Amino acid sequence: MEKYITKNGIKYELRGEQYYPMLEIAEQTHYEIGKYGHLHLDFIKNHRRGTYTTLLTEGRLNEHLHNIDAQAHEQIYLYIAQTAERMGVTEELKASAPMRWVQMMNNIKASAEESVLKEVVYK
C-alpha cells in the first residue's frame, strides 16, 4: 500500500492499515484585535459555533474580528460626535464647566458603547 494517496482533491496518509486525510487550516491574517473584536470572538465561540468554525476553517476569523472592531470604533466615534453636537456639549462648555462636560461626555460614551455592543458586537 502507498504511504500517500490523493482522492477527490484530498491528500491522505497511511497510518497503520487506514488512510487519514491530511487537512490543513488556511493561513490566517494577523491584524491586531481590540476590545470589541475580542468581545465578538467570545460571543461567536459561545453562541454562534457554526459561524466561528466556518470563519476559522476558511482562514477569515482574524480579518472578521478586525472588521467588527473597526466598525464598532467607527460607530462609537460617530455616535459620540453627533450626540455631543445635538446636546450642546461644546468646547465652550468644557472651558466654563469642565466637570459638567466630563459628566455629559461619559454619559454619551456609555450610551454609544451600549448601542454598538447590541448592534455590532452581539449580533
Image (cartoon, rainbow, N blue to C red):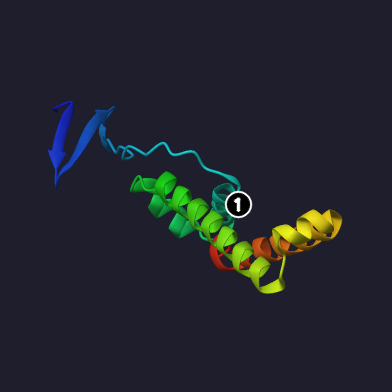
Residue 47 in view (yes/no): no
The number of numbered badges drawn on the structure is 1
- 7 above or below 2? below
Residue 83 placement, left or right of 52: right
Residue 20 placement, left or right of 106: left
The quarter of the picture where residue 80 lies is bottom right
| Closer-to-camera residue (18/44) | 44
Q: Quadrant of the N terminus?
A: top left
| Residue 47 image position (x, y, % from top left) | 57, 60
Residue 53 placement, left or right of 95: left
| Residue 13 image position (x, y, % from top left) | 23, 31
Amino acid on which disc 1 is placed: Leu
Residue 95 in view (yes/no): yes
- 57 above or below 19? below
Residue at 47% across, 50% down: 65
From this viewpoint, which residue is outermost toward the bottom?
86
The quarter of the picture where residue 86 lies is bottom right
Residue 96 placement, left or right of 65: right
- 101 above or below 88? above
Q: Quadrant of the C terminus?
A: bottom right
| Residue 60 image position (x, y, % from top left) | 37, 48
- State the residue position of label 1: 39
| Residue 87 image position (x, y, % from top left) | 71, 72
Residue at 44% across, 39% down: 31
The quarter of the picture where residue 7 lies is top left
Identify the element where label 1 is drawn.
helix
- Rate crowding at label 1 as few (under 14), some (14 to 19) or many (20 or more) other CA atoms within 10 Å: some
